[in-house]
Amino acid sequence: MAVIRIRVPITTLKSPIFKPKLLHLNKSSLKISSNPFKLSISSSFRPQKPLNRTSQSRSDDNFPLSNPSLDQIKPYVQSEWKPILKGWLCSVISVYCVSKIVPKVGNFSLVLNKMGEKGLIMKEGLILGGLVLVRLVANYWQQAFLWEAALNSAYKIRVYVFERVLKRDLGFFEGGSGVSAGDIAYRITSEASDVADTVYALLNTIVPSALQLTAMANQMLAVSPVLSLISAMIIPCISLVIVYFGERLRKVSRKAQYSVARLSTYLNEVLPSVFFVKASNAELCESARFKRLAHSDLSEHLRKKRMKALIPQIVQAIAVGVLLILFVASLLVSKGSFDGSAMVSFVTSLCLLIEPVQGVGKAYNELKQGEPAIERLFALTAFTPQVIEKPNAVDIGSVTGDVKFCNVSFRYGDNMPLVLNKLNLHVKPGETVALIGPSGGGKTTLTKLLLRLYDPLCGSVFIDNNDIQSIRMESLRGHVGLVSQDIVNLIRSIHGINVSKNVPIYPTATQTPTAPPRVTSFQGFISLGHHLFTDRGTCGQTRRDSDCGTRGRKRRDNDCGTPGRKRQVRSTYRVYDQILFSGTVAENIGYRDLLSGIHMEKVEHAARTANADEFIRTLSEGYETNIGPRGSILSGGQKQRLAIARAIYQNSSILIMDEATSALDSKSELLVRQAVERLMENHTVLVIAHRLETIQMADRVVLLENGKLEEVSPTYLMGNNNHCGSLITSEIAL
Ligand SMILES: Nc1ncnc2c1ncn2[C@@H]1O[C@H](COP(=O)(O)OP(=O)(O)OP(=O)(O)O)[C@@H](O)[C@H]1O
């Protein structure tokens, strides 16, 4: 059977600026693969008017008229038509002035010879001075407007790309794409700046350079080699100016670099935490924070570019001034024997001709540098989501916290082994269930399915008897709170690499041959290395029964219905290392309400309940203290209490806790333990447990191994010949 694969990038379709009216496929975009049974059509949606006949046929012949990179940025550049138009108008004025200045400068010496006609000299001098001034001002505004257009385009592209990146599935951030968080950050910061340079260079070349080049070509007919020596005399003067303004430019540039660094730091922080951002429905909020930083970067860069535009104008003004002085001086010295007119005309024309020629060369270089940046940036926005919200998905109001996993199977890729295999689990409202199992056993995966960060291969997850696939994602994640361990640990644990000094409870999971886990370091932070991840295709929607094995088989484990036992030991402590962001204490606790407005009373109440209020009040600015990247100014125990306060503030009916592995001193442990106990009250809790005390705290304990769940008893845990035995040993050893 013939396979027809139609791949349609939605980059431009989703553009915030243009809504496509017509979709175009042209012959060149239709590629027939060497496999006769596979027809692959890769097409770009064209957001603008359809091409006219001529350009379309040229494009069909692979005529390099349309550049795919430029097509992608075109809508954003076109949306800046106002500053572009203003910039080009200024360039017309500038070139008009220059075409008048050059002959006037040449003729001025003749006028000066008529010493008796002071009025004429004055008039010609004023006209010339006026033209020069208008030219300088027009030139400055031309560049300022064009930079404004270029930087605004880059800003819009950045915001669009970032919003699209936040919408990508979790799998993309977990190494499935081969794109690390650092790479994403670099593309959105540095490479978007390259795009701005490219846009500016092109805008500045299309009209201004072309106009000036044409005008100056006419003025260069009379060239005198002798006068070249005189032009060399202005170099020291210009050098002094360049040194002075260069220093100022350096300061402005440094500020601009800092703003890029801030942006990059933010991205490096938020992208690895996207698990938590998604779980907290915080995409909009993060988008707003990003916009603020990106806008500050826009302002700093605009200042820098304006300064860069100003320097050449001042240099030119000095050059003209020095030449005039030289001209007058040589006239006085030679008493009329020197042809000053030729000198001035030559140098002026030369200076003004060099400029556009340089511009064309620079524009070409910028374009060549910018093309890969544009491609890489927009590559981030082209994807087909695997986890799709149904159009008829509903919001659920309050929930009791009844959670069921029914016959759930899951694997990360088509060629990968099942992580969960026909798994059943019923957590009753208010119950605490501890999940234990070997590293890589699938505990974290189970919680990802509950948050719908992935869809199961088959089977279903229910909350209060509602299939979570029929619930709007924002509503679902509003009811499921995540108290996760630190993201660096989380990423490592996903790959079965234990980083903790005290929790080698289970042997590291045997790695699958198709997915060799690897952790690489890139520019100072941990990212996932090349992790072979194959697309699950339509698995989330069209379930493959063959993968689910014996569908009618008797259910194991709890059969989605085993009643929970009464709560056990409460007098134990847990440690939870948390994901915190740069920002104030209040912003971190009220994270879920950052956009709609934080309720300070609720924040303080949550902090008091989590035993955090006391230490917060000792901070320099109390709840308004900035806690630094990842809460760097706080101790481990303070971070944990802050994160527990955040979970209390969120007040979700269902809590997922991923126990962290760091140890605390006994006083901190006591405070954290109390906070966790309060947090667990009246919540359905699914806790990924690494320690015996956590297990003792739970109503029930389930062992997840080889994709299967099995309920275990404390007696089983105390046994010597199983994994849990090593847990006890490990705890006692501590
Ligand atoms: N994004 C991913 N892509 C591919 N494989 C993955 C991904 N995330 C996890 N895995 C694999 O799935 C399996 C289960 O991982 P999971 O993180 O759920 O285990 P875990 O029980 O939580 O481990 P730990 O106790 O170490 O945190 C592991 O073999 C892991 O390598």
Image (cartoon, rainbow, N blue to C red):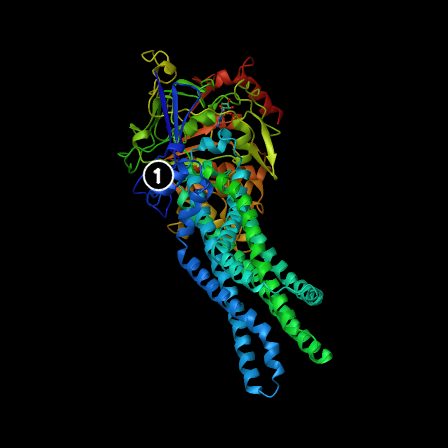
Tell whether 439 sits left or right of 58. right
Residue for point 43% across, 29% down = 447
Tell whether 480 sits left or right of 309. left
Quadrant location of the C terminus in the rendered image: top right
Specify the quadrant of the image occupied by residue 238.
Answer: bottom right
Q: Is residue 220 visible?
A: yes
Give the labeled residue for mark 1: 474
Farthest residue to the right: give it.
333
Specify the quadrant of the image occupied by residue 520.
Answer: top right
Q: Is residue 24 above or below residue 728?
A: below
Q: For the residue labelled by badge 1, is the local secondary structure a helix, a strand or a loop?
A: helix
Please state which of residues 599 and 112 is positioned toward the viewer in this rendering: 112
Please state which of residues 294 and 67 is positioned toward the viewer in this rendering: 67
Please state which of residues 164 and 488 is positioned toward the viewer in this rendering: 164
**Callout 1 environment at 10 Å: few (<14), some (14 to 19), or many (20+)?**
some
Farthest residue to the bottom: give it.
116
Label 1 beta carbon within 8 A of ligand 1: no
Q: Position of residue 498 (x, y in %)?
A: 58, 27
Q: Is residue 482 above or below residue 135?
A: above
Q: Is residue 545 above or below residue 89?
A: above
Disc 1 marks which amino acid? Glu
Q: Is residue 387 above or below residue 147?
A: above
Quadrant location of the N terminus in the rendered image: top left
Q: Is residue 568 visible?
A: no
Specify the quadrant of the image occupied by residue 27.
Answer: top left
Q: Position of residue 145 (x, y in %)?
A: 47, 60
Q: Position of residue 378 (x, y in %)?
A: 46, 40
Q: Position of residue 442 (x, y in %)?
A: 47, 23
Tell whether 106 sits left or right of 16. right
